[in-house]
Image (cartoon, rainbow, N blue to C red):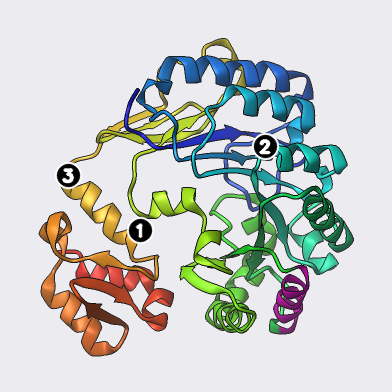
Amino acid sequence: MGAVRHLYVHVPFCAHRCGYCDFTTVTGHDDRHSAYVDALTRELDARGGVLADPPETVYLGGGTPSRLGPDLLGRLLDRLPRASRETTVECNPEDVDAALAALLAERGCRVSLGAQTFARPLLEVLERRTNPDGVRAAVGRLRAAGVPSLSLDLIYGIPGQSEADLARDLAVVEELAPDHVSAYELEAKPGTRFTVHYGAALAEQSERLERHMDLVIDLLGAGGYDWYEVASFARTPADRAVHNTAYWRGRDYLGLGIGAVSTVAGERRANGSKLAAYLDDPTGAPAVLETIDPDTARRERVMLGLRLADGIVLDGDLAPVIDPAGVERLVALGVARTDGGTLRLERRGRMLLHACVAEILG
């Protein structure tokens, strides 16, 4: 077996494509769910030799993996290698019935639940089909079933969202007490219908994003959550997302499914995004195949590693791409600190992440 310790599996199916989404998703085609699981199995058989036995993490993302339902999701989990540390499944609240919750608990899965917001009008803006009561019910079912770890996703910067709206969302999070929270600013990619409908409102929200982020950090911190990554908060170190941390540390990973990306041994591969073509030949030619030279890999590790509170080690193999004078400037500005050869961004620096990265990359 190989040395790649992390596996990502893309399940593209959604009940509805939200206007701000630019992920590889497929609506409808419920009759092809089973064939897609079979195709994933074929791709794993063909490309899975690079994986360690066992891998440390397996992550089912989307799309909406919970759209498969308990029977088919169970079949997929049976066909994937068992992770030694963490298996995560993304779920929409409206899919979480007692049977799905029982399956996820039985398999020891960490669940990432897409709450996004608890304000009904803002859920409508996001075109989400759940409601606040549905999120609460899903959390209750998952907890009652005994799911070992629960993460809630929140979005801020939604058109029409006030600081009071966000504070109420964070109060509900405190009430539900998940083990982990991912809080993202809304990113509506240019060209999506969301930017067409809400362009002016998004521009207005951009002026508030820093205040929104401050509020998220302060209130989650007061609730006992550690801000260990720019958009991630955990109750304890054991609650940190192991799979995502592997991305931020620049680890290799194998991606399966349409649109999935892999980074293995200096090569980045992106699968094609067409469902029919994938079902016909899941091991077909990739849409993108890119060689990652060592300096590019180092730069990516700096950019991703500085997202983490733990920071990056300045000495060693990252040194060729780091400008020591840039590091000194960040420290002098009070947005970073160095400690024992490690560079960590302070709160303000992490909020200005991209500017700080640009400052130190030589």
The image shows a total of numbered marks equal to: 3
- Earlier sequence position, callout 3 versus callout 2: 2
Mark 3 crowd level (few <14, some 14–19, many ≥20, 10 Å Cα): few
x then y, percent, for residue 315: 14, 64
Instruction: Confirm or deny contact between disc 3 and disc 2 (CB under 8 A).
Output: no
Crowd around label 1: few <14 · some 14–19 · many ≥20 (10 Å): many
Callout 2 environment at 10 Å: few (<14), some (14 to 19), or many (20+)? some
Q: Nearer the viewer, residue 144 or 173?
A: 144
> Do the CB atoms of the residues marked 1 and 2 lie less than 8 Å apart?
no
Q: Amino acid at mark 2?
A: Arg
Residue 225 location, quadrant: bottom right
> Magenta segment: does it hold 172?
yes
Q: Residue at x 69, y 40 (%)?
A: 64
| Tag 1 residue | 304
Judge whether 202 appears above or below 197 on screen: below
| Residue 126 within the magenta-colored segment of the rendering | no
Residue beneath the point at 44% across and 35% down: 55
Type of the residue with mark 1: Leu
Q: Is residue 125 above or below residue 201?
A: above
- For marks 3 and 2, give the CA distance: 38 Å
The picture places residue 334, in percent across and down from the top left corner, at 29, 88
Q: Which residues are magenta?
A: 164-176
**Residue 253 place in picture, x, y as percent:** 39, 37
Position of 85 with respect to 115 (left or right) is left
In the figure, residue 292 lies in which quadrant?
top left
In the picture, the quarter occupied by the N terminus is top left
Tell me the number on the disc at residue 294.
3
- Residue 121: % across, % down: 83, 67
Tell me which amino acid carries mark 3: Pro
* Residue assigned mark 2: 107
Q: Give the quarter of the figure containing the C terminus.
A: bottom left
